[in-house]
Image (cartoon, grey):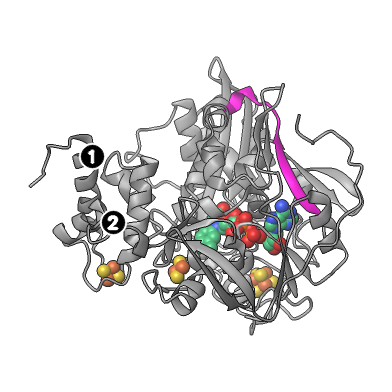
Amino acid sequence: MRPISYSRADAVADAVAAVAADPTSDFLAGGTTEVDLLRQNVLLPRRLVDINDLPLAQIEDRPDGGLYIGALARMSEVAEAPSVRERFPMVAEALELGASAQLRHMASMGGNMMQRVRCGYFRDAASPCNKRDPGSGCAALDGFNRGHAVLGVGEHCIATHPSDVAVPLMALDARIHTEGPHGRRVYAIDDFFLLPGATPHLEHPLEHGELVVGIEVPGTPMARTSRYLKVRDRESYEFALASVAAAVTLHDGVIADVRLALGGVATKPWRARHAEDVLRGAPAGTGTFRRAAGAEFASARTTPLNAFKVELAQRTMVRILETLTGTGTPSGTETDAAPDTDTHTDPGREGQP
Amino acid sequence: MSAPHVPSRAPAAAVLPERGPEPVKITLSVNGDEHTFDAEPRVSLLDALRERLSMTGAKKGCDQGTCGACTVWVDGRRVLACLTLAIACEGHEVTTIEGLAQGDELHAVQSAFIEQDAFQCGYCTPGQIMSAVALLKEGHDGDDAEIAEWMSGNICRCAAYPHIRAAIRTVRDRSRDPSHGQT
Ligand SMILES: Cc1cc2nc3c(=O)[nH]c(=O)nc-3n(C[C@H](O)[C@H](O)[C@H](O)COP(=O)(O)OP(=O)(O)OC[C@H]3O[C@@H](n4cnc5c(N)ncnc54)[C@H](O)[C@@H]3O)c2cc1C
Ligand code: SF4
Ligand code: FES
Ligand code: FES
């Protein structure tokens, strides 16, 4: 870890000005990404500007039934807030299924939106990585990529976006508020996360020194019964192999409206629009859910090690939709029949452990 | 009213004083006592406690947030000292395992760990205990599944988990019914 210097800001304008004026300064919030990656020599700032004293920790109700969550509200505080638990249970669930109790007390919501990928080659300063060192190549393409993404991938980077809570926020069409050297901006969450494309080192449309100040969650009555389902290698304290945030409303057994987003399988928090299109107006039932899941993964691109995620994620989607609509077979009795899909993956590679 | 729709008038920004990268004077309040020492801003709270203040209770397992051996409290909340910078704790109250006992009298959770045989090598134990006391305060002690989930940030290489849960249950049950299990 290289030496750094340290400043503490108590006003937003000071923090923004300090970082904007110096390409070698970074913001420090909970430090659970920043300090970790400093120690791995992956991030190399000269100075940290501590933003923890800024007055950005509010969790407020909006008149439309929505919320405004300050960037410095901690994951644990947001998960505990009655307004979040009652009106947006999938947000509370995604938070409580992430990291550990200690990390959730430290990690801020703004930092969570800005967290970096967990790709082992990104974290190893000696490996080629286009995200860390643009143009150096991607060691994961032919490396150990079992945890890597199958949606939104390209030739230059296949790292999975690691955030859990960004997944329900994607389903809710949240908006990210920032304050930067050019004033205040508001981004639709889908625009806030960039696909890697040819520039995987660019993850957000932000300028250097642009500070996330808050997250606006629009009022969404259907979210009251929403759920977040996360599948991982161990029961707790682990990132997702596949996760799904979902909210559904039914009218006479027909899906009137649906929100669906995926984690653990894509290079950004992934709104499952193809699946939503299949579901809207269709009768609720396992067959419909399987078709929807198949549609979402039609464009999946896999490697021999991560091809299992296509099947796993589809089953996760089907399971959560069955649970929410009360239509599924009781858990445990479901057969092993594959979803009736024709994903463009090499059939010989499917069914990996 | 929150700021969201108020256009910012960008008041003139103050230039922030900068400390480091060379060692600077850092003052920390740990277990109620103030300590001042020289350290570089990059020094973690864990290294400051262990190397500068000779409080070696908090352990370094992974130094990257994945094991919980370094668990301490900052302002009463359990956090990881390895991913916390010491300098960022100025103005906050740090509590370590050394601050848990009252003189010679162990904290109830410490006693329960001994009673229930909740450790083998003991390396993870200070972190487990700091986490366990916080868990009981947070109220995540309903049943074994809940305890396991809310203790999942503390890894035990010796897999003493069932005994750790038993120790937590013991303290929970005694606090619910003071006459219960008291010998
Ligand atoms: C062991 C471990 C397990 C984890 N497991 C999970 C998990 O299961 N699910 C999950 O979702 N996450 C998980 N995380 C990630 C964790 O949630 C993030 O590290 C955390 O949310 C980052 O927030 P922070 O406040 O600590 O940010 P920091 O580390 O302080 O900052 C992160 C980055 O964002 C920048 N930044 C911080 N705040 C702002 C702001 N307001 N505006 C602009 N830039 C900013 C910083 O400069 C830095 O580059 C895990 C982390 C660890 C270490
Ligand atoms: S997958 Fe992305 S983050 Fe990982 S090595 Fe390749 S370019 Fe780097
Ligand atoms: S040493 Fe801090 S979590 Fe392992
Ligand atoms: S007692 Fe040995 S690591 Fe937990």
Q: Are callouts 2 and 1 both on one chain?
A: yes
- Name the disc covering residue A313, or none: none
Give left or right: position of A23 versus B117.
Answer: right
Q: Nearer the viewer, residue B92 or A152?
A: B92
Give the numbered dot on residue B175. Answer: 1
Dot 1: within a 10 Å radius of its alpha carbon, few (fewer than 14), some, or many (20 or more) residues? few
> Can the viewer see residue A306 in this picture?
no
Task: Report which residue position mark 2 lands on.
Answer: B102
Disc 2 marks a residue whose amino acid type is: Gln
The magenta stretch is: A210-223
Residue A288 shown left or right of residue B6 in the figure: left
| Mark 2 or 1, closer to the camera | 2
The residue under the point 58% across, 23% down is A249
Q: Label 2 to label 1, Cα distance in Å?
A: 18 Å
On-image quarter of the C terminus of chain A: bottom left
The picture places residue B63, in percent across and down from the top left corner, at 49, 73
Q: With B65 as the anchor, is A20 left or right in this view?
A: right
Residue at point 89%, 37% (across, down): B7
The answer to if A215 sits in the magenta stretch is yes
Asked whether A168 or B59 is in front, the reply is B59
Q: Mark 2: is the Cβ under 8 angstroms from ligand 4? A: no
Q: Crowding near pointer 2: few (<14 within 10 Å), some, many (20+)?
A: few
Residue A223's x, y, as percent? 59, 28
- If the picture is divided into quarters, which one holds ligand 4? bottom left
